[in-house]
Amino acid sequence: MLDPMDSDLIRESLKPFSIGQEPSDVQVLELSTYLDLLLKWNAKMNLTSIRDQEAIVQRHFGESLFAASLIAKNCVEAQSLADIGSGAGFPGLPIKIAIPRLNVTLIESQQKKATFLREVIRELKLSGAQVVNTRAESLKQAWDIVTLRAVESFDNALQIASRLVRSGGSLVLLIGAEQTKKAASLLPEFNWNDPLPIPMSGQRVIFVGRKG
């Protein structure tokens, strides 16, 4: 087992992803605990193919917190968020850590991953966060914000995600830049912002659409 990454290094690794405000000491501690749990569980099940701690912090935590910064700035009235295919919890859990007022639902169909997500919520004592262990297409509820990242069957996942966004709500996609045109063409009922490049990620962007 690797030695845990200290809080100062976590904070330093996240600096490129901060928009206006860096994580508080409490938030960095929560992220550190989350990282430790991820590393321990990843030794037994495949939550992420990335093994380097700093790379995990930047690729997973950093991207998620970058999305959180945009949500905090542009979706100030939003009260609920659903993260589809949450997997190891990205971007939903770091968004919850960054914006505690949001009621966050992590939608994950795989039982083992859902169990991991519940363990993180329990360890961090996150109120207003829950895991739904089912397929997203079976849900009837609608949320203010729906997030989608690194999913298979992109076209189908987009259609499912769009149905879970309430009227006037936002769909937040963490995707490759080449996927933005497809997303906009498949979901013309959304008013799309210009894609925003994710720091240190090459061709990955955050693409936000508001449902008319």
Image (cartoon, rainbow, N blue to C red):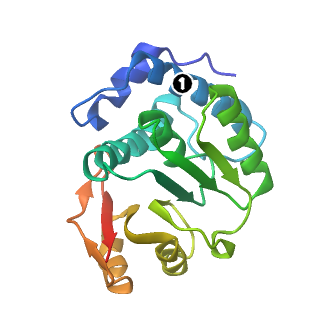
Q: Is residue 168 or residue 150 the one in the foreground?
A: 168
In this rendering, would 177 be left or right of 153? left
Residue at position x 47%, y 35% in the image:
100
Image location of residue 195, percent across then percent down:
24, 63
Q: Is residue 42 above or below residue 4?
A: below
Under tag 1, what secondary structure?
helix
Q: Is residue 1 above or below residue 49?
A: above
In this rendering, would 104 be left or right of 77? right
Residue, disc 1: 30
Image location of residue 33, percent across then percent down:
60, 23
Residue 180 position by quadrant:
bottom left
Check disc 1 and give the amino acid type.
Glu
Q: Quadrant of the N terminus?
A: top right
Residue 178 position by quadrant:
bottom left
Residue at position x 59%, y 30% in the image:
34
Image location of residue 144, percent across then percent down:
43, 60
Image location of residue 54, percent across then percent down:
46, 29
